[in-house]
Amino acid sequence: MIVNPYFSYIRVSTLKQGQTGTSLAEQQSAIGRYAERAGLTIVREFEERETAAKQGRPVFNDMLKALKAGKARGVIIHKIDRSARNLQDWVQLQQLTDNGIEIHFANESIDLQSRGGRLSADIQAVVAADYIRNLREETRKGFYGRIKQGLYPRPAPPGYLDCGKGKPKAIDPVNGPLVRRAFELYATGRWGLVDLADHMKQLGLRGKKGKPIRVNGLSIFLHNIFYCGLVRLKISGEIYEGQHEPIISKKLFDQVQDVLAGKTVERHYQHSYLFRRLITCVDCHMSLVGEMQKGSVYYRCHTRRCPQKTLREDLINERIEELLRTLKFNDAELEYVRDEVKRSYSTINEFVESRRKGLQLQIDQSQTRLTKLTDMYIDGTVDQEMYIRKKNDLLLQETEAKEKLKNTGVGEQLASKRIEEFVELVNNAYSSYKKAFPDEKRELIKIISSNLELSGKSLVIKLHFPFQIVSERQPFPAGAPQRDVPRTVPAWISQLIEYFKS
């Protein structure tokens, strides 16, 4: 039978302390020397790697249960602040003392059996509790302070690298592009989380410790606004502008959120008819449903008592081909368009500068409104909930304007190329449509038209704006233009140029 059996209890506050073992070794050594001097036998060691600021530490609780069960006469602890820095745990130790269980401190000569020793220990426990409260408050202040500076004080999410304290995260040259690819794929609405996680694993996307991203991890980072250059506080939902470089644009992030929320869903169909979900009823605005009848495909509205008739697929096809033929430019129109584009884009720098000034004014206005909002919050004019909501909206608007400002000039410089591509598309639309496969025809229809409607037995085709301009243009004389006649630029050409500038 062991004489004077005692437990020992040691604790480290951080994972780093537990890994290095420095604090553990010091505590174990001090407790061992104390036990040897006092003639006490340590029968079991309890080692905790958890902060004392948290009540209900598992190892500490196991030790209390064992002491209450009479498995030892008492416990030896390195110091009071190693036993408890919250007063709830200290109360439990006091109760053990009241029940005759001995509490020894290796580095402090305190007798808990005496009134004076008890008072001294109580004072030290209160001081330790106050210390941890202050430490927690200072840590919180530092955490929020770094976030307000645009720094993220926690480990970098997948796609970013930690660059040290006080420095913004840097884009991981390996995982960064893969994260962007994951956002781009999911934004299409054609990928589920499970399939996308498997696909990104094959591409080499890795998370913490080099492990593949699982479905839950993929969902978390697809929701993370950090990737478009912002930092959100989880508790309050408040958003701050980050110092780190964004991996994706705000526009792409919003598209992904729509898919995650179920606002954009890629549907699969049993019958892949050419005009499925492309034609709506002019009366009830429901999509027409394709059906095979007597060897032909018919589209009709399934709303009860709808007066609209059915429309055969080959007649729809003829109507679209007829429209595409009318879009084609003649030689004179092509020459006018190309000459006017060259003349218009000679002033591109002035246009770009004007656009930049407009966007910068928008950014300045957002910052001014944010300053006024902060003053109103400080004065108590608005409550915290409204302040956070309005502040987040202003920051998101400012982020979008900054993205546009960053890209201003790039798009305008490419506008000439875009209008040339548009002209090429219009000229070849009919021949391309005739040669295309069904899926390619559907994509071309979506590019050109905004909606197809059935009205009686007629198909009404509503075109996207640039194609509508071309479709409604005034007849232009074919053949070479006469040079002795002053050339006046048709309005539709000017409209096209302005459209592709914007």
Image: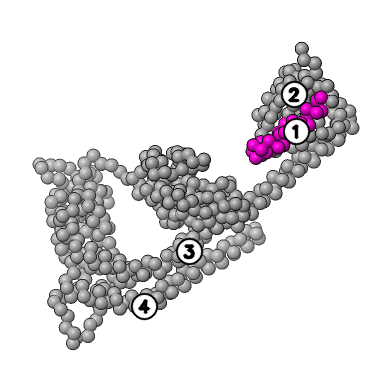
Q: Earlier in the sequence, mark 1 or mark 4?
A: 1
Residue topped by disc 3: 402
Q: Which residues are magenta?
A: 10-36
Please identify, in this view, whether the residue under mark 1 or under mark 2 is nearer the observer: 1
Please identify, in this view, whether the residue under mark 4 or under mark 2 is nearer the observer: 2
Q: Quadrant of the N terminus?
A: top right
**Could you tell me if the residues under marks 1 and 4 are in contact, i.e. CB atoms within 8 Å?**
no
Residue for point 19% across, 65% down: 427
Residue topped by disc 4: 347
Distance from disc 1 to disc 3, alpha carbons, whole Å, reads 55 Å
Relative height, residue 40 to residue 28 (above, below): above
Q: Disc 2 on helix, strand or loop?
A: strand
Distance from disc 4 to disc 2, alpha carbons, whole Å, reads 85 Å
Residue topped by disc 1: 27
Packing grade of label 1 (10 A; few <14, some 14-19, many >=20) is many
Residue 246 in the image: state x and y as whole percent. Answer: 48, 56
